[in-house]
């Protein structure tokens, strides 16, 4: 079994998410209090600070009504019983409900609860990668697909894998560790494709186009069909050394049956621990532009891989792209225009 503490420095997504929530709530309280100090304040003193912020004219996260009700409650608690929209506590009291909490305190509690509700209802403005504090410029998050062609100036160093394939040197140790752990479990993974220079990708693509043409398709149809399963040259992660096609010794064909092999099942379940994701998952074809490939692993780093795995995302979704993938031709035109302008 794989020790989940293998990478103890890697915080779990759940921890990170919890930390994020705490940070946001604390940050909001600090903002409401007009203080840059993000220290979480105890509920009571936070409420006092909010009142201070209101009186000092500092921007507050609270609604005007909530602010007024706090002031009213503090200045003349009895008056707020007559105010119809003061708060839930006020309503309860007005309706004759038995609430033994002092009104002033109850109003403050209600405000804190209201604030928390608002936070929960607020649309998630941050994309997953942003929540993890990552940037689109991070080398391990580079997006390569039909809409995102490999930048011309993209640079990387390659090293050999044990399987005579080449891979980006920043990825090699994690790949080897994953393969070794997989072997230690009794399976036989084989890297059948690592780095692939663009001319090799072109030959591969061309060969498939010819295959479809022989089956009677027009050239355009053949290109379209090929592009569903083979990355168009210039849009393959193999060309930047961040992807590895890994097969099982028992089935070395790149087909759906790959997922039935024990080797592949182990890899799909554990790859995230080493910073890899299954790049073209089932049912994400609209977003990735490539059909299900239970053998193509892409390096994105531990944290991103764990998040993607836990939330069942594809890389596009992790990067905030939730629209179906667009037209390659258009992307290519834009890419060429950009290159000309530079
Ligand atoms: Zn591949």
Image (cartoon, rainbow, N blue to C red):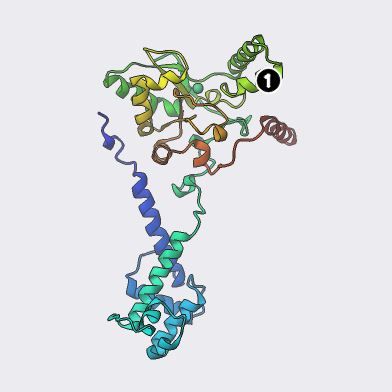
Q: Quadrant of residue 20?
A: bottom left
- Is residue 125 at all visible to an observer of this figure? yes
Q: Nearer the viewer, residue 19 or 158?
A: 19
242 to the left or right of 289: left
User: Residue at position x 59%, y 38% from top?
Assistant: 324
Q: Nearer the viewer, residue 199 or 331?
A: 331
Query: Residue 304, relative to residue 261: is it above or below?
Result: below
Q: Position of residue 66 (x, y in %)?
A: 46, 77
301 to the left or right of 185: right
Q: Position of residue 134 (x, y in %)?
A: 47, 45
In which quadrant is the N terminus drawn?
Answer: top left
Q: Position of residue 99 (x, y in %)?
A: 30, 80
Where disc 1 sits, the SS reads helix
Label 1 CA crowd tier, 10 Å (few <14, some 14–19, many 20+): some
Instruction: In the displayed orientation, state which residue is furthest to the top.
Output: 214
Q: How many marks?
A: 1
User: Residue at position x 51%, y 44% from top?
Assistant: 135
Query: Residue 126, relative to residue 85: is it above or below?
Result: above
Q: Position of residue 277 (x, y in %)?
A: 43, 31
Residue beneath label 1, please?
221
In which quadrant is the C terminus drawn?
Answer: top right
Q: Nearer the viewer, residue 154 or 264?
A: 264
- Is residue 160 at all visible to an observer of this figure? no
Disc 1 CB within 8 Å of nearest ligand 1 atom = no
User: Residue at position x 38%, y 51% from top?
Assistant: 17
User: Residue at position x 38%, y 90% from top?
Assistant: 78
């Amino acid at each position: 079994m794989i020790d989940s503490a293998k990478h103890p420095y890697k915080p779990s997504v759940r921890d990170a998410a919890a930390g994020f929530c705490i940070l946001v709530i604390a940050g909001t309280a600090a903002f409401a209090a007009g203080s840059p100090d993000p220290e979480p304040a105890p509920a009571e003193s936070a409420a006092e600070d909010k009142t201070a912020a209101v009186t000092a004219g500092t921007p507050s996260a609270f609604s005007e009504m909530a602010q007024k009700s706090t002031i009213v409650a503090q200045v003349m608690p009895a008056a707020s019983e007559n105010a119809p929209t003061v708060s839930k506590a006020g309503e309860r009291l007005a309706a004759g409900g038995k609430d033994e909490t002092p009104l002033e305190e109850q109003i403050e509690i209600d405000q804190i609860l209201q604030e928390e509700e608002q936070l929960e209802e607020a649309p998630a403005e941050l994309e997953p990668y942003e929540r993890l504090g990552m940037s689109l410029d991070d080398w391990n998050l580079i997006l390569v697909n039909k809409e995102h062609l490999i930048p011309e100036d993209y640079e990387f160093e390659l090293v050999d894998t044990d399987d005579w394939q080449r891979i980006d040197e920043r990825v090699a140790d994690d790949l080897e560790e994953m393969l070794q752990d997989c072997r230690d479990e009794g399976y036989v993974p084989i890297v059948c494709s690592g780095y692939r220079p663009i001319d090799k990708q072109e030959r591969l693509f061309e060969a498939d186009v010819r295959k479809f043409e022989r089956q009677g398709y027009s050239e355009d149809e053949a290109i379209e069909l090929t592009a569903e399963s083979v990355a168009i040259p210039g849009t393959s992660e193999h060309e930047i050394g961040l992807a590895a096609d890994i097969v099982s010794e028992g089935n070395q064909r790149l087909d759906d049956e790959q997922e039935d092999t024990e080797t592949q099942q182990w890899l799909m379940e554990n790859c995230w621990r080493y910073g890899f994701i299954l790049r073209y998952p089932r049912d994400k074809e609209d977003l990735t532009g490539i059909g299900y490939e239970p053998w193509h692993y892409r390096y994105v780093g531990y944290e991103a891989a764990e998040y993607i795995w836990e939330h069942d995302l594809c890389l596009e979704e992790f990067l905030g792209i939730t629209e179906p993938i667009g037209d390659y031709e258009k992307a290519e035109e834009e890419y060429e225009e950009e290159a000309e302008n530079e």
